[in-house]
Structure formats: C-alpha cells, structure tokens
Amino acid sequence: MVAIFLEQITTRALTHTMFVYMLNANNLFKGDRMKNQTSTVNISFNKELLEQIDRVAQRECRSRSELLREAARLYLERKDRWEKIFTYGETRAAEQNLHEDDVPAEVKQNRQEKRDRAEDRS
C-alpha cells in the first residue's frame, strides 16, 4: 500500500491529519508493498475502554483501527523520545562523573545560578 496524499481534516475544534487514499500498487513499488503489508491482530479491551475508543473515533470521523494505530504510533514515538533523553542523561552523567547522590546538590547549584542571572538582569 502506498499513501497517495494526506489531507488536513478540520472539524469544529478538532484538527488531525489522516490518510485519505491508499493505493494498492500491484506492480509498482513492490519493495514498498512488501514492507508496508498490514497484519490483523486481536486485542481485548474492557467494555468501558472500548466505548471510549469508539466515541473518540466517531467524533474524529475515523475508524477504530485508525485511532488505535495512531495511539500505538504515538506511544512508541514517546517511548523512543524518553529512551533518548535517558541515554543522553546517562552519557552526560558519566562524562561529568556524576552519581545519583550528586543530583540534589547539582539542582541546588543550578537554581542558585539561575537566580543570580535573573538578579544581574534586573
């Protein structure tokens, strides 16, 4: 499947981007088609959660599947972003030979430096 174009859908106070057309390119982009094949999965939700999902999907004019795909993608993006933040923090701590016990003193020093800069500007 190849996404042909994205369209910005605006409804009242809601804006979201959704795929408008998907093209099954039988002989075109064979490599892409193989990479983008979908799989069907079965997931169990309690009744209340499923009702919430369906209400949001209906309000946003999407299918349940579209909503859950986006939720999964956003979760994975956020998880990846946090992993990068923690890796950066661990790297910086190792470079500066900082340990968990050093954090309160570092925070205190940073806050004091911030106050000092603010006082210098006023």
Image (cartoon, rainbow, N blue to C red):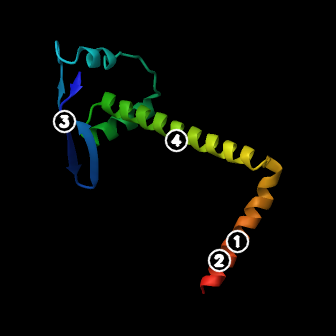
Q: Amino acid at mark 3?
A: Phe
Q: Quadrant of the N terminus?
A: top left
Few, some or many C-alpha atoms within 10 Å of disc 1 (few <14, some 14-19, many ≥20)? few
Tell me: residue 15, above or below residue 38: below
Please name the residue shown 67% across and 43% down the image: 91
Q: Amino acid at mark 4?
A: Arg
Q: CA distance from mark 4 to mark 1?
A: 28 Å
Asked if marks 2 and 1 touch (Cβ < 8 Å), the reply is yes
Tell me: residue 88, above or below residue 54: below
Q: Is residue 70 left or right of residue 11?
A: right
> Camera-side residue: 29 or 21?
29
Residue 64, horizontal then vertical, whole percent: 32, 30
Residue pointed to by mark 1: 113
Q: CA distance from mark 3 to mark 2?
A: 49 Å
Of badges 3 and 2, the one in the foreground is: 2
Please name the residue shown 27% across and 50% down the image: 15
Of badges 1 and 3, the one in the foreground is: 1
Residue pointed to by mark 3: 5
Q: CA distance from mark 1 to mark 3?
A: 50 Å
Few, some or many C-alpha atoms within 10 Å of disc 4 (few <14, some 14-19, many ≥20)? few
